[in-house]
Amino acid sequence: MSLKSSNQVATNRYQLEIEVDGDTFEKAVDHAYKKQKNRINIPGFRKGKAPRSFIEKYYGANVFYEDAINEVYPSALEEAVKAANLEMIEDKIDFDLVSAEKEGLVFKATITTKPEVTIENYKGIEAKKPPVKITEDDIAAELKKIQERNARMVTVEDRAAQNGDIAEIDFEGFVDGKAFEGGKAENYSLNLGAGQFIPGFEDQIVGHKANDEFDITVTFPEDYQEESLKGKEAVFKIKVHEVKKEELPELDDDFAKDVSDFDTLDEYKKDVEKKLTESRENAAKDDVDNQLIDKMVELLQGEIPAAMFENRINEDINEFAYRLQSQGLNLESYMKYTGMDEKAMRENMRPQAERQVKLRLALEKIAELENAKPTEEDLEKEYQKLAEGYHLDVDKVKKAIPAEDLSKDLKAGKAMDFVRDNAIVTEGEDSKSAAKSKEKTAKSSKTKATKEKSEKKESEASAE
């Protein structure tokens, strides 16, 4: 193969003229003949026995050229791209055949290339690191979560059911005196006050005790998913089997021994404080990184081919589909359940995909400008790390991930380290972090019942 010419025909588009020598093309033609001869009929010969010269005389000298071109084209193009010192991205390739004959093959390929980008002022980026403070209230809230995880349900015998209790009930619903599909269940555990069922249902269970049998009347919402029940009044026959409440363990030394390796509650509290501090320190570092990334993306200059964004979205969709598969779902079912089509999914993923592409281009450019290169030792350590993570032999990892690709990733990592090391970081919250913090605080102030309603809405819909 030889590269005859390389010309830029548009932004990020190059046309390469490529020549494949006669010997290489002849081998590809002969290979095509051997693959096809058993399917070709030539008068006077049994199928598969006709010499190549007879087939070419009968059908034309170029009868095997198309398959031969398809065979040599990918490797010839790859070599030519390297010779032209270009980096091709997956996109539409325009192919033009110049000539194909015994002396060789000449063709033109117009490809999309990685863009030339610039970035300035990436040294000394200013960022705010959120302050890390752990209060007694924080420790108490964490201990409360651990109490709730270790809570047990106990039967209530001395009072009627109230919000926050679990009522085990039988129920059957009737509209106009007739039972309707999906309106019946036995020994159903209903979390009172969680809003799992239609408005008014749980409220009318409150105040009743075990063994009570009674009727309640509710009205289905006008926007209820089942068309036949929208706006209809329904009567439910209820029987309460049992009422249970959540009982939290006492916060004492015995609790500490049960849930940790510590003997006293004071020791356990110190460990909780330590872990909360580590967690928030890591979150604060991530926050700073996000600010640096946002700034690098903003500083990047260059015309980026749309194909790079589309390719990244494709990768993200494939990764998402793989995660769904591990949970026993497929992408088609997921979109059906959520009412989302592929176009909407792609648009939802687009902002993050564009950010990822721009960040990678920025880091690659910074690595180039700062001459950031991984050593052989860096590569070997990364291969070892990957092998341990995937529980594979190092040699298998090396075969799966070429050193050239791994080197690019390590260069990007070194560039990110460079930006971090040269950033001007002061303590405080930037405007975005503050907004997120306020949003998080607002969300956390929701009642437990509201949270449970959100979490269980889909799974309980059929029982309403």
Image (cartoon, rainbow, N blue to C red):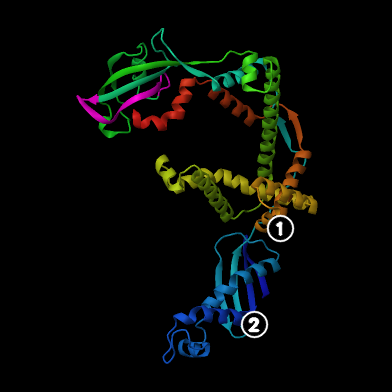
Residue 422 seen in the current view: no
Magenta highlight on residue 114:
no
Q: Dot 2, how many residues are within 10 Å of its Cα: few (below 14), some (14-19), or many (20+)?
A: few
Q: Position of residue 23 (x, y in %)?
A: 64, 82
Residue 322 seen in the current view: yes
Q: Which residue is mark 2?
A: 23
SS of the residue under disc 1: helix
Quadrant in which residue 308 is drawn? bottom right
Picture residue at 46% right of the left edge, 25% below the top = 452
Q: Which residue is mark 1?
A: 404
Q: Position of residue 402 (x, y in %)?
A: 69, 58
Quadrant in which residue 458 is drawn? top left
Q: Position of residue 172 (x, y in %)?
A: 28, 24
Q: Residue furthest top?
A: 158
In this rendering, would 75 be left or right of 234? right
Picture residue at 75% right of the left edge, 39% below the top = 420
Instruction: Work out whether 265 lies above or below 348.
Output: above
Q: What residue type is disc 1 on?
A: Glu
**Residue nearer the viewer, 91 or 174:** 174
Q: Dot 1, how many residues are within 10 Å of its Cα: few (below 14), some (14-19), or many (20+)?
A: few
Instruction: Work out whether 101 lies above or below 437.
Output: below
Magenta highlight on residue 186:
yes
Q: Which residues are magenta?
A: 174-195
